[in-house]
Structures are given as C-alpha cells and as structure tokens.
Amino acid sequence: MSSPELIDVHTHVVPRELPGEPAGTASGRWPCVHCGKPGHATVMMGDKPFREIDDRSWDIGRRVADMDRDGVTAQVLSPMPELLSYWLDVGPATQLTRYVNGAIAEMVASRPDRFYGLGSVPLQDPVAAAEELRRMKSDFGLCGVEVGSNVNGQYLGDKRFDPFFAAAEELGMAIFVHALHPRAAPHLAPRQNLVPFVAFPVDTAMCAATLIADGVLDRFPGLRIGFSHGGGVLAPILHRMEHGWHASKGFGGTLPKSPKTYAARFFYDSLVYDHAYLRHLADEVAPGQVFLGTDYPYLIEQKEPAKFIADGAAGTTHGGSLWSSSARRFLGMPPSSR
C-alpha cells in the first residue's frame, strides 16, 4: 500500500545568488548572499549578517533527498521572508521580487512533480503589487504569494491593501501570511531570543484579527488566505473575540458574522509542535482547512513531518485533510488522483 500524498506548504528558499543593489538606491538593507565553505553561505542585509544558510536553501537535489527521507511528496517553495523587502523603494523592490520569483519558478520547472511555488510582490505599494501578482501568474506560473504579517507596521486589514486582494481574488491566487518584523519586537529588544518564539505568533494573530475585524473576507469572499505557525495565537483569542462580538452587537454592527465563522474560512499550517493543539485546529477552529507546514530548512523546522501528521490526525474527525487535500484546495489545485 502506497503512502498518502503529503504536501508541505511552508518551506523557504534563498537563491544561490541575488542581484546587486541598483545604482543610486543605497538603502543599506539590500539583501545579498556571501559564500562560505562549500555548501554554506551567509545572507547579509546591507553590511549586517542576517542568517547562516546551507545548500538546502537552493539545491533541488538536496531538497528532494530530504523529502524522500521525510515522506513528503511535494514542497511549496516561498522566499525567505526577509527577501520580501517592503522597506525598499518600490522600483528596486520590484526588481528584486522578479528575480526571486524567477528563481522559484526555475526550481519548480526543474521538478514539477515535487515542487509548487509562492512568490512575492512589492506590497508597500498595493497597486503595484496587484500588477506584479498578474505577472507572477502569467510569466512565472506560480500558484500564490507569500506576504508579511504587516507591511512597514500596517496590518493587512487596512483598505489600502484592497487592490492587492482584489487581484488575488480575480486571479485565484493563494495568499500565505508569514510573520515579518513583528510590531512587538522593539519591546523585546533586551530579549531577542524571544522574538521568533513569542512576537512572531502574536503578530500573525494580529494580522488575522484585522482581516476579520476589517471585513476583508466580506469584501473579497473568494480569497484563500493561509497562516503560518498555525495562525499564531489566533485560536486562543478567538473565544474572547467571539464574546466581544456578541457583547458589542457585532462590534457596533460592523461585522455581520462572528469571528469564529471568519476564522474557519482561513487556512492554517500545522507548525504548532503539539498534537493536541493540532487536533484542536483541525477539528474545532478550521475543519478541513489545516495543512502540513514545516518551515524547512530553518532552525524551528518540524522534524519527522509524516509521523507528526499521522499522530496528530489520529482520533480526529477532519485529520485526513492534513495530508494533502486542504493544501490542494488552498493552492487551487484539483484533488489528488492517489
């Protein structure tokens, strides 16, 4: 009996090389990749080291070998979040995103049986982002886009992002939200080790809460939005949001449906490290809307993903969708023939 199809929606890439900063930009925060010993490199943001990486970030053969070891049928490739570069001017940022999107498209084209792609857009200009989303689909053939949880401090529920959401709905492109430069991070300055483990999940939930409260799913009911890290701390605060919705008569009549109703329309990855919490997401928060996400190939990666999904699915009503069917619906793909 063959193993079930397993799709990992949350994995990241960094191209082996990045283009140089355009003349006259001088941002001080342009990303580049510095070679180290064979198979290793350092991602620099301007002249500051950001992250040590290895060839898993760009080497197809290495990734496929790891997927075969881990029982993963396919990975969805998305940029290392720092490459989203919302802090750059729109022109240079667009050049960078096109380069990275092209690199992801080449990786997908080399093994279309094992990879799908999410690109990036210059969301600091939502109109330009909408145009790049069209290019991403027509020129690069990617199935969706990765976006940060906030854009230079602005959460995504704000109506200024409506042109981008309108284009994503029109094109049927999936939107995967990943924490980026959490707004709470400055308050944790003396405790930087807490930022990825505390501030990231808080910022992801703040983003999701604004999308709910600001009516994005009412304005664009066809959107498919997924959240990394299991939606962060959204699930624990949903009960409080639900009570507030009832107590305030729909937040003063601005929200026609309950927060839990909207939250159940989002997708979530499984990167929560806890079987009981994964079962809660899969059965109570968003039935049929949770898929595998590992954060490969970084430090907080979920190891042994097939075992984690199998153990998490045990005893659930909707656990079967964790393997691939929810991922396929999120990506806009037909059901598996396996």
Image (cartoon, grey):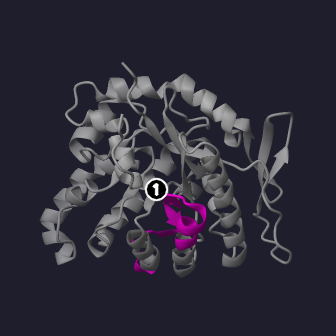
Looking at the image, residue 66 sits to the left or right of residue 213; the answer is right
| Residue 243 seen from this side | yes
- Residue visible at 13% across and 63% down in the picture: 246
In the foreground, 309 or 205 = 309
Q: What amino acid is labelled 1 in the image?
A: Phe
- Residue visible at 48% across and 33% down in the picture: 73
Whether 272 is drawn above or below 161: the answer is: above
What secondary structure is found at the residue carrying circle 1? strand
Q: Is residue 247 magenta?
A: no
- Residue visible at 43% across and 69% down in the picture: 171
Looking at the image, residue 72 sits to the left or right of residue 328; the answer is right
Q: Position of residue 234 (x, y in %)?
A: 34, 51
Residue underneath mark 1:
176
Whether 312 is drawn above or below 43: the answer is: above
In the foreground, 327 or 192 = 327
The residue at the far top in this view is: 1
Rendered image quadrant of residue 320: top left
Q: Position of residue 282 (x, y in %)?
A: 27, 39
Magenta range: 134-160
Q: Position of residue 101 (x, y in %)?
A: 64, 60
Question: Where the N terminus falls, by quadrant?
Answer: top left
Rendered image quadrant of residue 244: bottom left
Question: Where the C terminus falls, by quadrant?
Answer: top left
Whether 68 is drawn above or below 120: the answer is: above
The residue at the far front in this view is: 337
Q: Is residue 137 magenta?
A: yes
Q: Position of residue 102 (x, y in %)?
A: 67, 59
- Mark 1 nearby-residue class (10 Å; few <14, some 14–19, many ≥20): many
Looking at the image, residue 231 sits to the left or right of residue 61; the answer is left
- Residue visible at 34% across and 51% down in the picture: 329
Q: How many marks?
A: 1
In the foreground, 223 or 278 = 223
